[in-house]
Image (cartoon, rainbow, N blue to C red):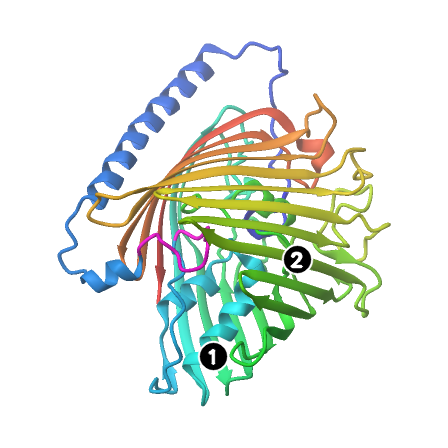
Amino acid sequence: MCHRGGAVSSPRPSKTLDWGQQRPAAGLAAIDQHRFRMRIFARILVVVSAWLAWQPPNQVSAQDLSNFNFDSGRLAATSPFERLNAKPADSSRSFFGFDTPLMTDLLDFQNQQSEKQTWLIESGGDYPDGGLIVGTQLRSSLLVGTTNRRNRFSYLGRFPADFSGRTATDARLLHGNVAFAAHYGSLFHGYFETLFSDVFSFPTFNQGSFQVRQAYIAVGDFNQSPFYLFLGKKNVSFGDFGTLSPFSQAIPWHYFAPLAEGIGAGYSQGGFDFTVTAINGSRGIRVARSAPRGQLSNFAANAAWSQTIDGIGYKLGLGYLHGTIYDTNVADHVNFTISGKQNPAWNANAGLSWGQWDLAAEYTATFNPWLLTGEPVQAYRTEATYRLARAPRPTRLSISWSEGLQGPSGSPFEFNRQLVLGSGVKLNRHALFTAEYVLSAGFAPLIDLTTVSDRSVRQHSCVLGLVLVL
């Protein structure tokens, strides 16, 4: 699978016990010790989250907190940092500036990917004579985990080959971003985003060092017309692939969220958004792939509707991606020279916001079986959050269940499953603290799928996160 948005290296060779073989007493004692440590860490996690949530906002202004309430101006938003209500045009803004709400949305790599170009165009209303907005994001994480199968670590937020043995303790800066949103008058807009992602699994560190993650142009002025164009490298408008968890991605994101180069057009008005995108051939990032290279040989379409009726927010979406990596009998989707008969994917997603509750569901599947496994590739998520109304700081509790299916029933590579129990606390208008317990079931990396998979793997993880955005 695409852990952290990249390729999965095969885990280190290990001698594993047969399923029916009894484990030695020393091994059982070690597992009990690890479980004890996990229980202690989980209790600390809960205490820290509760303490932060109920700390009085001494140096945080009321305006800071009101700017980051959980009631989103954009319906049923799934980001832990919800979007503010749309601001009217302000011609008094200086040419150069900062816009934390906008950059929080644009730099969020896992939520509402299909709509970000519309937010870029909307923000141009504040800079009718042109302007440049600069943003940064630092996404840090502390993980403590234990697995029941030696050298098999299935938490999707890390590469499995980063760890060995039965335990994992890991502290790192997962992402460091610098981004620029430019407005060349009211009609032309540009977005440029760099990414540092520290990946240990690759000996050359090429993927983990530094890259331009997105760079595209958008043409549109919603004060004049609901139609717009875009061109460049960006998240493909297909599906939702967000999560209500405060930090960890849901499984559908790992299986199907595409990023690629191409050209597209859209329509956005009255809560309805529709886009079509022509995508360059060859290998994109994660799921998009088509042949031949050097032609616009792939395409995607996406439609989303959102509305508030009697105080209840609704969101519905449908998407289609024509070329995916699930088109050959080879479990290797990083080689751009490999391709087969195109195996399209379709997506349906829904969201509901009612009082303190937010609910979300999403399902994505290929139209045809993957030749490698003889089964269609599927992924879904069901999630819920509850906002604590009386907490001094904006706080949200969440539960997320997601699953990916790609193998025959009973096979070692049938599934990947994930349960996330999380809490997110907004410390101020720039900082989000998160705490999660994650249960990862099954070990089926989508590279070397049929040779290293193990359905019996269970990894228990406690994950602390701190996201800073300016």
Tell which residue pokes out farthest to the right in this image: 341
Q: Secondary structure at mark 2?
A: strand
Of residues 288 and 82, the one nearer the viewer is 82
Q: Is residue 446 above or below residue 297?
A: above
Residue at 59% in and 58% down: 204
Q: Residues within 10 Å of mark 1 (few under 14, many from 20)?
A: many
Tell which residue pokes out farthest to the bottom in this image: 129
**Mark linked to residue 124:** 1
Q: Secondary structure at mark 1?
A: helix
Residue at 45% in and 59% down: 74
Does the magenta-highlighted stretch encompass residue 79? yes
Q: Amino acid at mark 1?
A: Gly
Q: Which residues are magenta?
A: 69-80
The residue singled out by tag 2 in the image is 302
Image location of residue 96, percent across then percent down: 38, 84
Image location of residue 350, percent across then percent down: 55, 45
Residue at 47% in and 44% down: 352
